[in-house]
Amino acid sequence: MIVKPMIRNNICINSHPAGCAAIVQRQIEYAKKNLKPIDGITPKLALVIGGSNGYGLSSRIAAAFGYGAATVGLSMEKAGSARQTGTSGFYSNLSFDKAAAQAGLAAKTLDGNAFLDETKALTIKAIREISQEAKVDLIIYSLATPVRTDPKTGTIYRSAIKPIGKPFSGRNLNMMDGTFNNVQVDPATDQEIAETIKVMGGEDWELWLQALDSENLLSPNTRTVAYSYIGPEHSWPIYKDGTLGRAKEDLERAALEINKTYKASGKIAGAWVSVNKALVTRASVVIPVIPLYVSCLFRVMKDMGLHEGCIEQIVRLYKDRLYLPDGAVPADSMGRIRIDDWEMRADVQKATMENMAAATEENVFAVTDIIGFKHDFMEVHGFDVDGIDYSADIDPCGL
């Protein structure tokens, strides 16, 4: 099969196996070059919940190939078939497993719904298969899904990306052609707010800690991190002050509860929410205002030599925050790890806002990095990757 990108309404509905594999290998090489194990501090067994794309995938790669950790990765992906490609996460997982086996690293990759009790049980079984004695000393919670089934009631909850209290309107950038349009989003109902918190908040993170603790898989060295985003005040009506922001606040609530329950009794080293930099993901292109903001941000950060992708962010998270030689974990006044610090620098934000205000369809390619935004969007799906022959016949079932 010859695979070309299929894009519908700014959503890519296929992926390229070889491109996905190349991206994984590139991240592996970066982790190997920039991370070194610290005896007694860096992880030996990591669980990554949501580990097939974005920050989750980079977290698993960095733990395994930077620190030599055994890893268990959980995600829910669609496999390729003779008629169609699988998801990019499916190919990323295959690539990770192949590279880990070649490097002699213990690894288990599971496909399943992370919210379900049976999936948690299968994950615990996989951990035991790696080692009967080892504890899970790094737990990354990086789920990105619009739907959750409550394991106790069977109720299905659906998230919504909406403002709260009043409608939101703003200028949006179509990253495929550089055109602008005005968007308006009606405010969320109380039910939509509650369901978004159920799907994207911290309740399931807490349930994972309970499940692991019940099987005696936690240790005083265990660090657990959930990923979040805050962004600039410009985006707050649709993000921080909207339904997504309420869910992220619930992650912070969960971190406090996890620390009260497990850190206070010496069962873990701590739980943190890590506030990360804005990056291009499969979801970011459909959040109003974000494509324009990110395109302008990328232009500024690249010009200043500050730009980072997923693996660069995670390597910095591990090396400069989570695994310092003295064991300390630098955090802000609310206990959050901030690796969005370069994005939120005053000079970066000032220049970004100026570019956003100045951007028109006539100058969009000059004042924004829409080309870089589109490139990153394509790369997420294995396209537009250097060194890949996209005219070659490939097997969509594997690598």
Image: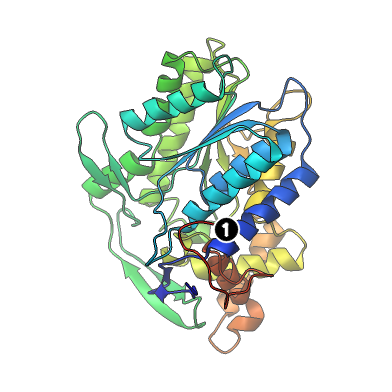
For label 1, count other residues whose C-alpha is less than 10 Å away and answer few (under 14), some (14-19) or many (20+).
Answer: many
Residue 154 higher or lower than 32, as above or below: above
- Residue 199 percent across, percent down from the top left: 33, 42
**Residue topped by disc 1:** 279
* Residue 317 shows in the view: no
| Amino acid bearing label 1 | Leu
Q: Residue at x 39, y 60 (%)?
A: 81
- Residue 208 percent across, percent down from the top left: 42, 27
Relative to residue 58, is residue 286 drawn left or right?
A: left
* Residue 4 shows in the view: yes
Viewer-closest of 247 and 52:
52
- Residue 109 percent across, percent down from the top left: 50, 39
Q: Residue at x 31, y 50 (%)?
A: 159
Residue 93 higher or lower than 70, as above or below: below
- Residue 325 percent across, percent down from the top left: 79, 26
Residue 48 higher or lower than 261, as above or below: below
The kind of secondary structure element at disc 1 is loop
Q: Residue furthest bottom?
A: 362
Viewer-closest of 88 and 212:
88
Residue 223 sits in quarter: top right
Q: How many marks?
A: 1
Relative to residue 192, is residue 42 drawn left or right?
A: right
